Amino acid sequence: MPAATSPCAPERRPGGADAADRTPVEVVRSHLAAVRALDAPAMAADYAPDALLERPDRCWQGRAEIAAYFATVPARLAGGRVEFTGFDEDRLEVRWRLVGGPGDGLCGRDRYEVRAGRIVRQQVVLDGAVDF
């Protein structure tokens, strides 16, 4: 049975000499902490240099493109926030919903692939057809 836990547990930040030693769960928790803080540089810091971020309407390849995408997130949320509603640690899948702002009520899930302490792929799946 998959382990479902709160994504609010303490995390380690990336970038130190031990970044490659982080478990996949630690990497995802670090990323979620950056998203909660709306810290765009920290959101991108957990990605591998050649990572892939897939959203329903577009893909970003490489940490530089991913960082540019994350730099748009605070403005696109426009005062809203991302609320994480579940974390399946076995599948590295996070459920979320947007609260407030133009995307209020939008829900989805993110699936992560992590290697050597970095996110190599993130796939965003929306529960509805409309993105924010």
Image (cartoon, helix red, strand yellow):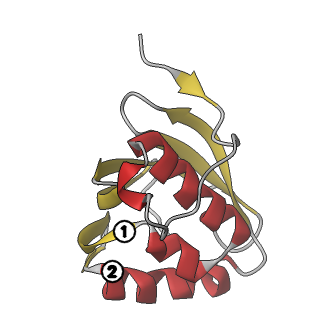
Q: Eyeballing the image, is 112 above or below 85?
A: below
Tell me if 68 is positioned left or right of 122 in this view: right
Tell me if 21 is positioned left or right of 95 in this view: left
Residue topped by disc 1: 47
Q: Is residue 132 visible?
A: no
- The front one of 54 and 42 is 42
At x 78%, y 77%, the residue is 79
Element under disc 1: strand
Q: Is residue 93 visible?
A: yes
Q: Position of residue 96 (x, y in %)?
A: 58, 48
At x 39%, y 44%, the residue is 24
Residue topped by disc 2: 63
Q: Quadrant of the N terminus?
A: top left
Mark 1 touching mark 2, by CB under 8 A?
yes
Element under disc 2: helix
Q: Quadrant of the C terminus?
A: bottom right
| Label 1 CA crowd tier, 10 Å (few <14, some 14–19, many 20+) | many
- The front one of 116 and 8 is 116
Q: Position of residue 95 (x, y in %)?
A: 53, 42
Q: Position of residue 69 (x, y in %)?
A: 44, 83
User: Could you tell which of marks 1 and 2 lies nearer the N-terminus?
Assistant: 1
Mark 1 to mark 2: distance in Å? 6 Å
| Label 2 CA crowd tier, 10 Å (few <14, some 14–19, many 20+) | many
At x 72%, y 65%, the residue is 81
At x 60%, y 27%, the residue is 5
Q: Eyeballing the image, is 131 above or below 27?
A: below
Q: Eyeballing the image, is 45 above or below 72?
A: above
- The front one of 109 and 4 is 4
The kind of residue tagged 2 is Arg
The kind of residue tagged 1 is Tyr
